[in-house]
Structure formats: C-alpha cells, structure tokens
Image (cartoon, rainbow, N blue to C red):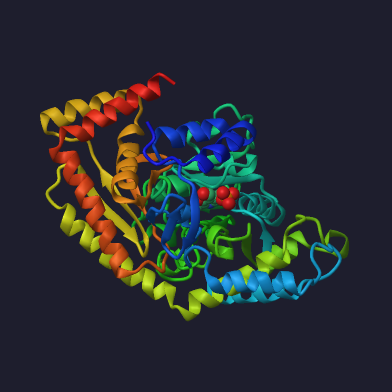
C-alpha cells in the first residue's frame, strides 16, 4: 500500500532500484516515504504530486542555509560561466586560499591552514594521517557512540557493530573511551601511545549528547599534557548549526584540528575541510618533495570553493548563527511545554538548531505491551513509526538518530521561519498525543513490523 505514488516516480524508482540500491527503495516504500521531489527551497520540499513537506532533517545538517539558496546557485553558475581553470592539478587556486583564510579566521585559536576534501569521512582519514605524521604515534583514541564516517579509517573510530560488522579488519591501534568520562580518558592518554583524540563536541547520532560543561575543556588540557592532538569532528555541529561558528566556541576550546563538511558548500557540491595548526601543516608538508604528499583530485575544486565562499556570505549576512541560537531555544521551550506530561517523552535537549526529543518505554499497561512487542522485533521500529507518521500525516520530514533509535532528531535548516517551527511543534504534539491515546498508532506499528518480518 503506497499512498503517494506517481507513474514517473515508479519509473525512476525501478531504474534506481535496478542499478543503484534496491534495498533502499524497499525501505522507503515500506515507510511510505518514497516520494519524487520536484523542487526544494529554504526549509520546504515540494513533491511532484503537489505536497509541501517541511524539512526538519536538513540532510543530516547539510542544508544550514536552506535548500538551493539563490546566492550559492548564482555563485556556481558564475563559476561555470567564467570557464576558469578546473582540475588542472598544476596551479594554486586563489578561491581555496580565500576560503581557507575565512574559515580559519572564523574558527580562531591555533587553526591557520586548511586541507580541502570532498566529504566528512575524507576529513577524518586526513586527521588520522596528519596526527600520525605530526606526533610519530600510531594510536588514535575516540569516544563511544561517535559517528565519524564509513570509510575504513573513519569506521575504525566508531564502535557500533551495525556499521562495522562484515567490513574488518579495520585499523589497528585504535581505542575507545566512554564519552564524557574524564577518568577513562586520562588513563588512556597517560600511556602516551595516542597521536590524537578525535571527538564530536556534541554527539549527534548517539542521541544529541551534549557533554557536561567542563568535559571537553578538561579533555583538551589532558591531551596537551600527554602530547596527544585534540581533534574535533564538527561535520554536523559546524557552520553555525549550534549557534556559534563551531560548537567548540560554546566550550572555549582551541582544538589542534577541526573537521568540517556537509553544510560547507551550501548542500550543492561535495566538499569538506580539515582546519589545522601551522605546526601540523609543517609536519606533513615538510619539504618540497612532500608538497603533495596528501591530496585528492577534487580537493580545492572551483565549484566547491565558490560554493563555500557564498555559503559563508549567506551565514554572515543573514546572521544565521544568531538565528540558530534564538530559534533553537524557542523550539526547545515550545516542545517542552507542549510535550510535558506525556509519559513516553523523556527529555528535549540540544544546542542551537541541533536538538533531540528522547522517548522512553511507556509504563501504562496496554501501551507497554505494544511497545515491547515492537521492541522485541527491532529496536528501531517505534522510532520509524514516529518518523513515518510525521511524514505521512503531518508533511514533516525527520529521522531518528543513527545509533539511538529512541531519539528523534530535530535539525531544520537555520533559515526556518517561526511559523514553520510552530507547524513542527504542532505536528509532533499531535503524533505524541496519538501515541498516548490511540490504539491505531500501535496497531499500525505492529502491521509494519509484520511486513518487515515477511521481507
Ligand atoms: N562526522 C560526522 C559527525 C558525521 O555525522 C558524518 C556523516 O554523517 C561524517 C563525519 C562523515 O561524513 P561524510 O558522510 O560526508 O563522509
């Protein structure tokens, strides 16, 4: 049963299914989310069938400045029209210098240089190599619950077996400490085996985990004491997602390296950057013969650089950092007010426009019995029911966190309007109300599970 299907979308789907990823199409079909999008603008997605969907996922924090921002689109067209050098691999692109200078100035602290790549994972691969080159140590430390990307090096810094299983052996010499636990970190660091501690300042996929105020400051100090580089993965939290340019700025941190990607190029061109200190740069690119010892074909490409510069202009001119801070507070306050008293809502938390609504198992008998039957089959079904209802019934696109299925991620584009925030709060409240009062929510969930099991 598909509620919103059009002939053109099924034709596209079958080509996609045949030649790209049929399992993904089946998942989308099952969740009744397999839509054809005609146009996307700001925080809204318009389907071929005429639906208007509010985007509260932002492609996992890609669309900070909104979909298809006209200034980034214009910058890209201009770059193509001027027919300048692209991929010569034999010149020093000025736009890359300009973007690096602006990113480092905004990040501050000891960050003076940038290495550009095309994704967050590539940034993590880069910091692993640079940390080894700079410190001469092979060990890399990371935190439980982290998400750093799915290339082999990045995956080696993640603990979740869902992502790791079947792809080993991964990098040796990596170790994991509980996120937020200073004592465990101190013990590991004191071995002086680790070149870097790589950590997200706010863990997004583990459930929007905001650490205690002092944790990251103390972690940084310990890293300095034991000669380990303090590296922040700001792939989701950077570019004003949480208010300031970097989440590091909430905590007064001065990391040795920062990884950026996702929102860096306005959501239109693959792009990523590692910001690093002069000392680290000099350890890697240490002589003429090592001038290109770490690089990549599409690094510093003109489209990504121009998109990056235009994205920074938009973030600055539209004061989107201030907007993220103010709207984020308002959003969480409204959600807390509207969701108070529902036994399955545990907490609303976050910073800026990176928030999560954490749910918990119900106590009330009939709800608990249904919840437990779902949970026994797959711990993600309850969350997907929520996502599906929001999408189908309320025209809101959202998702649960990748490794904490009880947390609904709330991350709209930073350009989201007050009216759109109110629409979202109303939508979530209605679905939460149904989950507490209507048997239909649970019977639908059980039907979904049976379809899943039969696949
Ligand atoms: N780091 C974080 C915190 C992420 O959320 C992601 C992707 O979701 C990555 C790194 C990897 O980025 P990419 O998918 O661009 O390789």
In the displayed structure, 305 sits above or below 35; it is: below
Q: Position of residue 212 (x, y in %)?
A: 34, 57
Q: Quadrant of residue 44?
A: bottom left
Residue at image location 51% in from the left, 75% down from the top? 314
In the displayed structure, 259 sits above or below 4; it is: below
Q: Residue pushed farthest bottom?
A: 317
In the foreground, 275 or 215: 275
Q: Is residue 200 visible?
A: no
In the foreground, 61 or 179: 61
Q: Quadrant of residue 228?
A: bottom right
In the picture provided, is 114 more to the left or to the right than 387?
A: right
Q: Position of residue 90 (x, y in %)?
A: 86, 65
Question: In which quadrant of the rendered image does the N terminus lie?
Answer: top left
Residue at image location 57% in from the left, 64% down from the top? 264
In the foreground, 442 or 105: 442
Q: Residue pushed farthest front?
A: 7
In the picture provided, is 438 more to the left or to the right than 177?
A: left
Residue at image location 55% in from the left, 55% down from the top? 226
Q: Position of residue 377 (x, y in %)?
A: 34, 23
Q: Is residue 207 visible?
A: yes
Question: In which quadrant of the rendered image does the C terminus lie?
Answer: top left
In the displayed structure, 38 sits above or below 310; it is: above
Q: Position of residue 426 (x, y in %)?
A: 22, 56
Q: How many marks?
A: 0
In the picture provided, is 114 more to the left or to the right than 362?
A: right
């Amino acid at each position: 049963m598909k509620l919103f299907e059009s002939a053109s979308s099924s034709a596209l789907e079958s080509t996609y299914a045949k030649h790209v990823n049929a399992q993904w199409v089946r998942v989308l079909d099952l969740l009744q989310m397999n839509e054809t999008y005609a146009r996307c603008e700001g925080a809204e997605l318009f389907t071929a069938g005429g639906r208007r969907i509010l985007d509260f996922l932002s492609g996992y924090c890609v669309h900070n400045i909104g979909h298809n921002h006209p200034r980034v689109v214009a910058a890209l067209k201009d770059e193509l029209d001027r027919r300048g050098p692209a991929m010569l691999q034999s010149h020093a692109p000025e736009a890359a210098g300009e973007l690096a200078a602006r990113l480092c100035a905004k990040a501050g602290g000891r960050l003076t240089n940038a290495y550009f790549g095309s994704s967050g994972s590539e940034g993590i691969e880069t910091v692993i190599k640079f940390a080894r080159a700079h410190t001469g140590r092979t060990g890399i430390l990371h935190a439980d619950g982290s998400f750093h990307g799915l290339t082999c090096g990045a995956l080696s810094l993640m603990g979740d077996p869902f992502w790791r299983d079947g792809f080993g052996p991964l990098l040796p010499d990596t170790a994991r400490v509980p996120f937020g636990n200073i004592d465990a970190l101190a013990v590991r660091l004191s071995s002086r085996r680790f070149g870097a501690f790589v950590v997200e300042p706010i863990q997004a996929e583990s459930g929007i985990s905001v650490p205690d105020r002092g944790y990251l400051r103390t972690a940084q100090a310990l890293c300095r004491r034991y000669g380990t580089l303090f590296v922040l993965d700001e792939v989701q939290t950077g570019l004003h997602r949480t208010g300031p340019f970097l989440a590091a700025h909430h905590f007064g941190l001065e990391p040795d390296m920062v990884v950026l990607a996702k929102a860096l190029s306005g959501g239109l061109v693959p792009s990523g950057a590692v910001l690093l200190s002069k000392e680290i740069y000099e350890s890697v690119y240490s002589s003429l013969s090592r001038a290109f010892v770490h690089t990549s074909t599409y690094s510093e490409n003109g489209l990504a650089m121009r998109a990056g510069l235009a994205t920074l202009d938009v973030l600055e001119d539209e004061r989107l950092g201030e907007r993220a801070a103010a709207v984020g507070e308002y959003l969480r306050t409204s959600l807390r007010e509207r969701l108070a008293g529902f036994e399955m809502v545990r907490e609303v938390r976050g910073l800026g426009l990176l928030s999560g609504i954490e749910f918990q198992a119900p106590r009330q008998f009939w709800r608990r019995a249904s919840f437990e039957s779902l949970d026994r089959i797959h711990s993600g079904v309850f969350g997907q029911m929520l996502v599906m209802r929001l999408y189908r019934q309320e025209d809101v696109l959202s998702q649960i966190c990748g490794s904490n299925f009880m947390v609904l991620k709330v991350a709209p584009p930073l350009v989201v309007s007050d009216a759109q925030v109110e629409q979202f709060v109303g939508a979530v409240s209605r679905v939460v109300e149904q989950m507490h009062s209507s048997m239909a929510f649970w019977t639908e969930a059980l039907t979904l599970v049976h379809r899943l099991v039969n696949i």
